[in-house]
Image (cartoon, grey):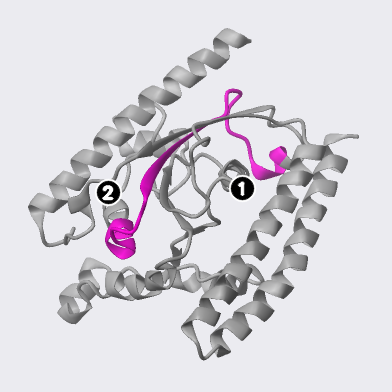
Amino acid sequence: MTGFLLGTLVGLLFAVNTLFWFIPIIILSVIKRLMPAKGLERFMARLNDACAQNWVGCNKRFSDGLLPTRFDVRGVETLDVNAQYFICSNHQTWNDIHVLQKTFHGKAPFFKFFLKQQLIWVPVLGLAWWGLDFPFMRRYTPAEIARNPALRGKDIETTRKTCEKYQGLPVTIFNFLEGTRFTKAKHARQASPYRHLLKPKAGGFAFTLTAMGAGLSALLDVTIVYPEGAKTFGQFLCGEVKNVIVDVRQLQIPADFFAGDYEADAAYRKRVQDYVATLWAEKDARIEQLLSEARRRT
């Protein structure tokens, strides 16, 4: 089968699978919001997450069965599907989303990510994200806060209320700390001190921790490496991504990171920035090590 036909087939299967699972997710979401009892609402939330896991599982089977991509996944053996995790990962291509879903399917709870408020209007996916209780957030700019000081901290307060729905439920929250996909042009514009990474946004890291609270079981530091170079999602569907390495480190989150004001507390801000800078320096070295290992094998 040619790459174009393969890409068309896998892309069609992904699309049909998404529409198929969208229907029960929306039905369950409406029922969940009509539930008078908290326990029943949480039960429906678990059913909804189970549908989402089945969606991921079907996509995983399609890619495993049809695509030649070889996955080398390390560090997921001791994860718990009933825990609460925070994932931070490097970001190179939209393939990363599928790679992360495939890596943690059946190993950790279904993962969710913070979304800009405007994304709720994305066709099909926006409603699905709403139904699955993805945390929609609005970040206020310094200029907006200067004009209206009452907005200070409101973004975290609003998101924290959304995250209260996760209390007592298995969940994985993830964040691309670079905030955008890595490219050589972006790397040069930033004058990034890292060889393989853009500068991380420590504010986003702190935001996630203060929104989720101390119930998080661990930080999962994920490093994704494409030994032949990152490719587009279309190229992935066409079978052009031959190898992917996913390295996962499970780290204890410092207890004092859960309660702090990143904007107003300079000492707290520096602690978080130093921690994230160290994390990113280690990740940069790990990428170089994994690339070197891959080169030696070829």
Question: What x and y, as percent, mark residue 284?
Answer: 37, 27
- Residue 89 is labelled as none
Please identify the quarter of the rendering in which residue 144 is found: bottom left
For residue 147, side relative to residue 238 (left or right): left
Residue at 66% across, 72% down: 25
Q: Which residue is mark 2?
A: 202
- Pointers 2 and 1 in contact (CB under 8 A)? no
For residue 41, side relative to residue 63 (left or right): left
**208, above or below 1, in the image:** below
Q: Count neighbours of disc 2 (C-alpha within 10 A) and say few if under 14, some if 14 to 19, many if 20 or more.
A: many
Can residue 214 be found in the magenta stretch? Answer: yes
Q: Amino acid at mark 1?
A: Gly
Please identify the quarter of the rendering in which residue 187 is found: top left
For residue 170, side relative to residue 250 (left or right): right
The residue segment tinted magenta is: 207-236
Q: Which residue is mark 1?
A: 106
Residue 44 visible here: yes
